[in-house]
Amino acid sequence: MTDPAIARPEVLRLEGLSKRYRADRPPILEGIDLNLRAGEYLAIMGESGVGKSTLLNLLAGLDRPDSGRVVLEGVDLSELDDDATTLLRRRAVGFVFQAFHVLPYLTVEQNVALPLELLGIAAAERRDRAAAMLGAVGIAGLAQRLARDLSGGEVQRVAIARALVHRPRLVLADEPTGNLDPRSAAQTLALLREQIKANAAAGILITHSRTAADTADRILVLDASGLQCLAR
């Protein structure tokens, strides 16, 4: 019988990924391998300075590795120029940040619809998809409110809706609950997992928190020796 996990399409593959910023220093990442399929949600933990942010930038095509490959949706990012990489990232990747990066003087609906506008989606469809996504994250009634008037937990829900509205295949969450109180953090993590699963996306959570990491399907620890699976 075929393993259901193997039957799911591959979203992301890393092969021997390495990166250094100075020739006289050890590489910040070396020989990183990873395979991630649709519907999988993993957490990556690690001490400050081990390369979590660098890894995230490489996954999204915001930086280039010195060696190895990042294959996203079957496309080797090293074979793309900057413009093609940007287009692939807009289409296939959703970001949720600790600092939210929600624009305060736009409405909630306008913030959520921004990725669709960048993809050239027509205005009527943008409104429909933004409304559906706001309903999914439980803030449909806030669509016309300015983002500056929201609570921290509400803003993070906007950030999740914006990250998922264009139906990305890969969701990258970088310490998404670092600025939230424990109750809002727990709600945000549950919502993030629920929406990643509902959209059959693949998700990676970067976090220092074991509590946050425990919401993922599996936990990897990044250190000088690479990515190691953390036993539950």
Image (tube, helix red, strand yellow):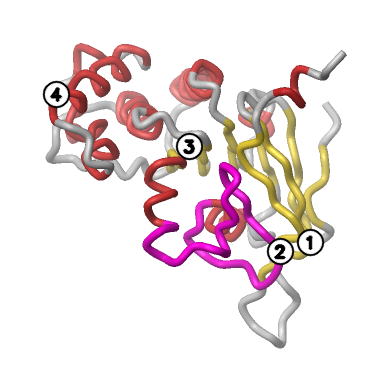
Q: Which residues are magenta?
A: 60-85
Residue receiving disc 3: 176
Residue at 14% across / 37% down in the picture? 106
Residue 72 among those drawn in magenta = yes
Mark 2 residue crowding within 10 angstroms, few (<14) / some (14–19) / many (20+): some
Q: Identify the element where label 2 is drawn.
A: strand
Question: What's the amino acid at mark 4?
Answer: Ala
Residue at 61% across / 77% down in the picture? 21
Q: CA distance from mark 2 to mark 1?
A: 8 Å
Looking at the picture, how far across and down is residue 222, in whole percent? 74, 51
Residue at 56% across / 19% down in the picture? 197
- Ranked by sequence position, the earlier of labels 2 and 1 is 1
Residue receiving disc 2: 68
Q: CA distance from mark 1 to mark 3?
A: 27 Å
Residue 189's tag is none
The nearer-to-camera label among 2 and 3 is 2
- Ranked by sequence position, the earlier of labels 1 and 4 is 1
Residues tagged 2 and 3 counted as in contact (Cβ below 8 A): no
